[in-house]
Image: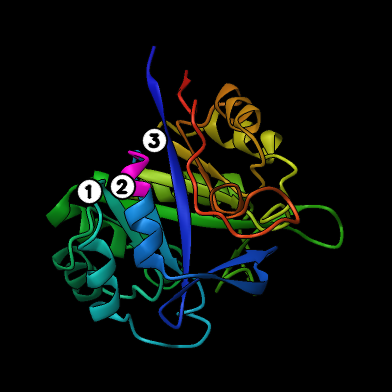
Amino acid sequence: MRRIRVIPVLLLKNGGLYKTISFKNPKYIGDPTNAVKIFNEKETDELILLDYNATVDKRGIDFKRIEEISGEAFMPMAYGGGIKSLDDAKRVFDCGFEKVVINSAFFDNIGLIDEIAGIYGAQAVVGSMDVKKTLLGKNKVFAASGSKKTKYDPLEWAMKLEEHGVGEIMVNSVDRDGSWDGYDLALINKITEQVTVPVIACGGAGSVDDMKEAVASGASAVAAGSMFVFQKKGMGVLISFPTGVTIKG
């Protein structure tokens, strides 16, 4: 029986830590460096740091800031946001990150997966997909922080990412982001039945039971934001990693 990774996702904006609901209405949480220090004490499995609006704002990566943050981490860290090239990825790794999380750039250059994996290994490349329902109720993959609809359905894009060599796929439900209503289990199950690479479930977690359900649906790891930065739904900020979060699958 394997131990499932439980991964806090920290959203970076203008150097600060924020949390969104359905990728909108960002709320300031505090300093990401302090949050990383707390997660160190909680012995968190790993962290994902996302500068979630970097692509939309057409900003470059703040390498100085992310190096400051990674320098405080005692656990593996992945970074995403604004990575467009192999050189960008190299500089992120040089800042101390073990993995890069890439979304929008792969729609313009799917071969970037092969370039990065060829040097750093597939395990260092996480393909992130943001999934949102259309007005007709169909799941579609979106780019640019959920603002740009692509032509791909989630299963098709997941298989394409795997074909080009990603080490993991992070499936993020935009509609459930910050909802505390649980993961999109049907979506997770559909994707994990067709790909062999590990899938990280993200979007909607409100309890350990939600995480267990995601694992039962096929996820190899579970990620969450609100659950780790707020006391409870609708309550104040509290950076934490709940005790007893040991999930096996």
Left or right of 189? Residue 58 is: left
Q: Which residue is mark 1?
A: 74
Span shown in magenta: 39-43
Q: Position of residue 218 (x, y in %)?
A: 54, 26
From this view, report whether residue 198 is shown above or below residue 9.
above
Q: Are marks 2 and 1 in contact (CB under 8 Å)?
A: yes
Q: Nearer the viewer, residue 44 or 54?
A: 44
Dot 2 alpha-carbon crowd within 10 angstroms: few under 14, some 14 to 19, many 20 or more: some
Q: Nearer the viewer, residue 80 or 231?
A: 231
Task: Say which mark, if any, is on residue 40.
Answer: 2
Q: Which amino acid, mark 2?
A: Asn
Residue at mark 3 to residue at mark 2: CA–CA distance = 27 Å
User: Which one is nearer the viewer's eye here, 106 or 247?
Assistant: 247
Q: Is residue 115 magenta?
A: no
Gap in Å between the C-alphas at discs 2 and 1? 6 Å
Secondary structure of the residue carrying tag 2 is helix
Q: Quadrant of residue 212?
A: top right
Closer to the eye: label 3 or 2: 2
Q: Which mark is residue 28?
A: none
Label 1: few (<14), some or many (≥20) within 10 Å? some
Asked if the residue under mark 2 is in contact with the one under mark 3, i.e. CB atoms within 8 Å, the reply is no
Marked residue nearer the N-terminal end (1 or 3):
1
Q: Position of residue 174 (x, y in %)?
A: 67, 58
Label 1 vs label 3: CA separation?
Answer: 26 Å
